[in-house]
Image (cartoon, helix red, strand yellow):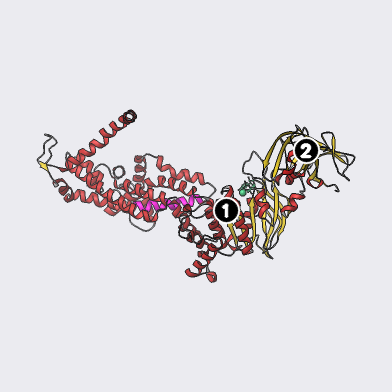
């Protein structure tokens, strides 16, 4: 089932009379989520991810815009008639019910011709539980489960009615780092097996990048970029997206274009054909630095961190925006780096230019 | 280690002295009194020990009437007031506008003096040669005949008694229940809504289990409070409750000690112990029943 969002806008009226401004939680969101895909909705806290999800689920009504599931306009349907499964950040499992009772609960609500017998319900619940591998735990209470197991119960409960769309709001944020890795693979697997169109909210870019077919990067209620994770990473449309994706984060320098060349700290460091002369931001991915004794970018070395296969070179530069520059280079080149000054040349594909005023990307031919 | 222990006991000493002097000692005394037969308060002598006092109290028609009144009061007011408080609290938490105003209004009786409320009830229910009282005006408007609620038939008095008791305990229960309802996480309701759960089912399957510890607490304290009823009846029917036929067990105990026909600490003690046994039994039954139905996180 494809999900179409058309100029979706949600404005919360401000109740505080002193501040007259309303909160625009989601602004003019237009996108078509293809059938059967896993989409990661990504952005910093308060950017409107949960609101978008609640609009799709029907828990919130949009101020304007429309939502379609396939060809059905569901904008005015209440949540129960939309056929969505929703997994909450804290799972919202009913603590006084066993796992089985929790999973069966949505089925017991069915009325009329959809009504199921006890046996049918149980069979469906066990199917959903098998899918998420918790069918051994059916008689336990949620409080007797680990975080990861609770999370799976929540997914099973969302899946048991075979929803048309599965919505997950920060499903991994309550888990520890290891379990998070495991569980995100699990979500990917479940999504693949069921083929249900899934929207997955997270503020962890790594999480979104690793399992999504598509990621949507939002900021202040506005969609900044949509694309395959690698595309968005390699080709950010603005400085915000470039900064938001990638660990370690992208390194931003104050630079200037002088006669078709990028200058950082007075040195010409890269050919940038086709860009007119102006001050810009130059952002370089950590893997965009090449150690080079004759390299034009001269940084002062702070330290070298060995991370096994790769090493991370930490250095500083007067034109650098942040605290320290982090560059990742392969371990073979580590021997060269010991002098107080470390010199780099830049990979053009890993270097992005942005306008100083609106922070939009400035493209140059490589 | 030894030293620390002594220090700890020293800290406890003031509280322990008070509890000992005003709680433990009287309690033991009550038990002893209740078994002393033929106690004479003037000469402070008695014949011997035995169960005579209990037998006397249990055959005393004033005690039996007090026992009956108390049980009727308990059986009617505890479920009705808890149910009503739950109903009002659910309504209160489902409205947005004017919620605070209504909450304040419902809480007002709690901070109002019992005697003042008693006076208001007199005005509402009392029938004098000059006026019928507000309730009777209503009764007549509906085609009935005026009833003397304060000095009239037993059931009329009992009705006022129950209404008054419910009215008095309602605010506290509403206060506790609204905060219990507010503490149920919204996510449960959202999850239920997405699953298409009906309103009644949400209440029965989610809200009720979630606030069951609070309800249980209110029922237990409600039972204990209602069994100890006395001052409210005085406020309504005056100090001579036996004459009004509205006496309660605690009222009987008081009468046996200080009433016009009083001066019998042994009978009073026996009645107090019987009350204690009743409350204990009811509480134990409550605990047994609740262990099946009350859910603790
Ligand atoms: N009921 C509401 N009334 C008013 N403003 C709201 C309401 N719900 C959300 N907002 C505002 O809308 C904006 C988006 O909120 P939303 O919950 O969608 O953020 P989010 O991206 O999910 O953030 P997080 O990652 O912290 O969960 C925020 O500025 C928030 O303050
Ligand atoms: Mg959120």
Residue A270 vertical position relative to residue A197 in the rendered view, above or below: above
Whether B244 is among the magenta residues is no
Give the percent coordinates (x, y) of residue A114: 54, 70
- Depth check: B184 or B117 in front? B184
Left or right of residue B155: residue B212:
right
Residue A48 visible from this viewpoint: no
Residue A79 visible from this viewpoint: yes
- Depth check: A209 or B97 in front? A209
Left or right of residue A139: residue B115:
left
Residue B117 vertical position relative to residue B42 in the rendered view, above or below: below
**Magenta residues, dominant SS class:** helix
Which residue is at a point 35% across and 41% down the rendered structure image?
Answer: B114
In the drawing, what numbered circle is on residue A74?
none
Give the percent coordinates (x, y) of residue A183: 59, 54
Query: Do the CB atoms of the residues marked 2 and 1 lie less than 8 Å apart?
Result: no
Q: Which residue is mark 2?
A: A253
The answer to whether mark 2 is within 8 Å of ligand 1 is no
Residue B146 figure quarter: bottom left
- Same subunit, labels 2 and 1: the answer reads yes
- Dot 1: element: loop
The magenta stretch spans which residues? B77-93
The chain identifier of the residue carrying mark 1 reads A
Q: Earlier in the sequence, mark 2 or mark 1?
A: 1
In the drawing, what numbered circle is on residue A88?
1
The chain identifier of the residue carrying mark 2 reads A
């Amino acid at each position: 089932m494809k999900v179409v969002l058309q100029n979706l806008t949600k404005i919360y009226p401000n109740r505080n009379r002193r501040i007259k401004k309303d909160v625009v939680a989601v602004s003019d969101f237009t996108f078509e989520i293809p059938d059967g895909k896993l989409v990661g909705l990504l952005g910093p806290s308060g950017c409107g991810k949960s609101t978008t999800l609640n609009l799709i689920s029907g828990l919130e009504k949009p101020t304007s815009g429309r939502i379609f599931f396939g060809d059905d306009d569901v904008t005015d349907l209440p949540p129960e008639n939309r056929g969505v499964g929703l997994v909450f950040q804290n799972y919202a499992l009913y603590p006084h019910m066993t796992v089985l009772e929790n999973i069966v609960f949505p089925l017991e609500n069915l009325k009329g011709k959809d009504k199921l017998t006890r046996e049918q319900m149980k069979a469906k619940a066990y199917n959903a539980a098998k899918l998420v591998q918790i069918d051994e735990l059916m008689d336990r209470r949620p409080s007797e489960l680990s975080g990861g197991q609770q999370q799976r119960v929540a997914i099973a409960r969302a899946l048991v009615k075979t929803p048309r769309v599965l919505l997950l709001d920060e499903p991994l944020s309550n888990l520890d780092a290891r379990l998070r890795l495991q569980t995100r693979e699990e979500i990917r697997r479940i999504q693949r097996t069921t083929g249900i169109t899934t929207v997955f909210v997270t503020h962890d870019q790594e999480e979104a990048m690793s399992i999504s077919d598509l990621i949507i990067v939002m900021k202040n209620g506005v969609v900044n970029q949509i694309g395959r994770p690698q595309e968005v990473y390699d080709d950010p449309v603005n400085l915000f997206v470039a900064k938001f994706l990638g660990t370690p984060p992208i390194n931003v320098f104050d630079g200037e274009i002088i006669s078709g060349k990028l200058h950082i700290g007075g040195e010409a460091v890269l050919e940038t054909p086709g860009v007119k002369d102006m001050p810009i931001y130059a952002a370089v991915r950590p893997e965009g630095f090449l150690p080079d004794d004759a390299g034009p970018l001269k940084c002062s070395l702070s330290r070298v961190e060995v991370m096994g296969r790769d090493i991370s070179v930490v250095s500083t530069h007067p034109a650098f925006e942040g605290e320290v520059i982090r560059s990742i280079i392969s371990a073979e080149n580590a021997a060269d780096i010991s002098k107080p000054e470390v010199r780099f040349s830049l990979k053009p594909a890993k270097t992005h230019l942005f306008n100083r005023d609106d922070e939009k990307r400035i493209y140059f031919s490589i | 280690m030894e030293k620390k222990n002594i220090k700890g006991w020293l800290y406890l000493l003031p509280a322990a002295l008070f509890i000992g002097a005003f709680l433990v000692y009287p309690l033991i005394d009550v038990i002893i009194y209740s078994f002393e037969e033929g106690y004479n308060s003037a000469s402070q002598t008695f014949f011997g020990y035995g169960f005579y006092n209990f037998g006397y109290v249990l055959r005393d028609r004033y005690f039996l009437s007090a026992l009956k009144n108390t049980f009727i009061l308990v059986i009617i007011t505890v479920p009705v007031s808890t149910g009503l408080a739950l109903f009002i609290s659910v309504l209160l938490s489902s409205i947005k506008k004017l919620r605070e105003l209504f909450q304040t209004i419902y809480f007002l009786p709690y901070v109002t003096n019992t005697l003042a409320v008693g006076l208001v009830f007199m005005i509402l229910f009392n029938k004098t040669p000059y006026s019928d009282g507000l309730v009777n005006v209503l009764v007549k408007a509906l085609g009935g005949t005026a009833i003397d609620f304060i000095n009239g038939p037993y059931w009329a008095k009992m009705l006022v008694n129950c209404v008054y008791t419910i009215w008095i305990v309602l605010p506290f229960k509403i206060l506790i229940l609204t905060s219990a309802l507010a503490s149920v996480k919204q996510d449960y309701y959202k999850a239920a809504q997405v699953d298409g759960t009906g309103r009644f089912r949400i209440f029965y399957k989610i809200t009720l289990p979630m606030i069951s510890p609070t309800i249980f607490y209110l029922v237990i304290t409600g039972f204990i409070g209602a069994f100890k009823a006395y001052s409210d009846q005085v406020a309504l029917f005056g100090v001579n409750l036996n004459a009004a036929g509205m006496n309660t067990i605690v009222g009987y105990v008081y009468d046996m000690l200080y009433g016009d026909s009083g001066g019998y600490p042994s009978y009073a003690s026996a009645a107090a112990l019987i009350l204690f046994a009743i409350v204990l039994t009811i509480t134990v039954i409550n605990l047994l029943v609740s262990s099946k139905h009350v859910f603790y996180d």
